[in-house]
Amino acid sequence: MLRFTLSRILGAIPTLLILISLSFLLIRVAPGGPFDSEKQLPPEIEANLRAAYNLDEPVVQQLGRYLWNLAQGDFGPSFQYRDFTVTELIAGSFPVSLRLGAMAMLLALSLGVLAGCVAALRQNRLADYSVMTAAMTGISVPNFVMAPLLVLVFAVWLGWLPAGGLGDGSVSHLILPVITLALPQIAYIARLTRASMIDVLRSPFIRTARAQGLTPLTVLIRHAMKPALLPVVSYLGPALAGIITGSVVVEQIFGVPGLGRFFVQGALNRDYTLVMGVVVFYGTLIVVLNLMVDLLYGWLDPRLRR
């Protein structure tokens, strides 16, 4: 297991380096700059600003400086939010995004696995067709379409929930964003669970468990659930990535002051360091989460350790 873990960690390091380097170069190649505005700055003032932020250096030298600062935990200063560093902006807004994503992931796992098990146990019946129809709908409708629809129905027409913002921090303000983020993942997890559970329930060891007189619920929980969840576990990495990237749009729609809103504002304002900081932070988070999923999958299936 130790060798398996080390191989995954060593594979994650070059992935991060490639991600950081490509993101850095693509941002520098994009047209415009952090000091572009409707009012043109005098050339000498713009030159002084570029020199103050080391933007007058060659791109390779800038990349080397950025990697060195990043190794020390310094994401650099923000070009637009002058009173804050990028590290402070990330530290202040990420807990909101984390709470949103964790609740959405918990909801997606709970409802997705339950719906998939129900569909597998009622294969080719009304319950199965209903679950798969709902799953296809959840996959087909993107979150930037689902979010306004949920606001229109539950906030405008029915008046049950607030339309956006965090308000006093109560759970009611998070219900619509969490549901919007969770719906596509519920659909994917339900489909994966259904297909895997159907295959497992046809296995010889399940027939043996039934022949021993065990109840259907005992067979499902104690014998079928663990092998059936292996595809779901392997999907957790992409699912978390989908929730993280989806939160960028959802937080902007619902006015939630999370990390996604800073990313959008940084991109609109050409705030190089803020955009890079969010990309690197999210990229590192996704790599770490995928690494954890690999280790969990290796623990569940010992054959992968070899």
Image (cartoon, rainbow, N blue to C red):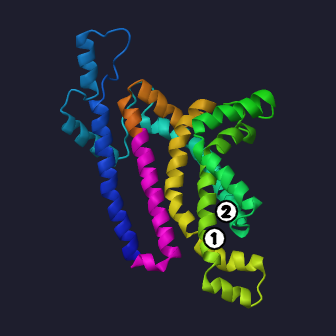
Q: Residue at 30% across / 36% down in the picture?
A: 26
Residue located beneath label 1 in the image? 197
**x, y percentage for residue 181?**
61, 44
Please state which amino acid type lies under the numbered disc 1. Met
Q: Residue at 54% across / 66% down in the picture?
A: 231
**x, y percentage for residue 200?**
61, 76
For residue 116, which numbered disc appears in the image? 2
Circles 1, 2 touching at the beta carbon (< 8 Å) = yes
Callout 1: SS: helix
Q: Residue at 57% across / 40% down in the picture?
A: 142
Asked whether the viewer can see residue 241, the reply is yes
Callout 2: SS: helix
Return the residue nearer the eye: 247 or 136: 136
Q: Which residues are magenta?
A: 278-306
Asked whether the viewer can see residue 99, the reply is no
Picture layout, residue 10 above or below residue 258: below
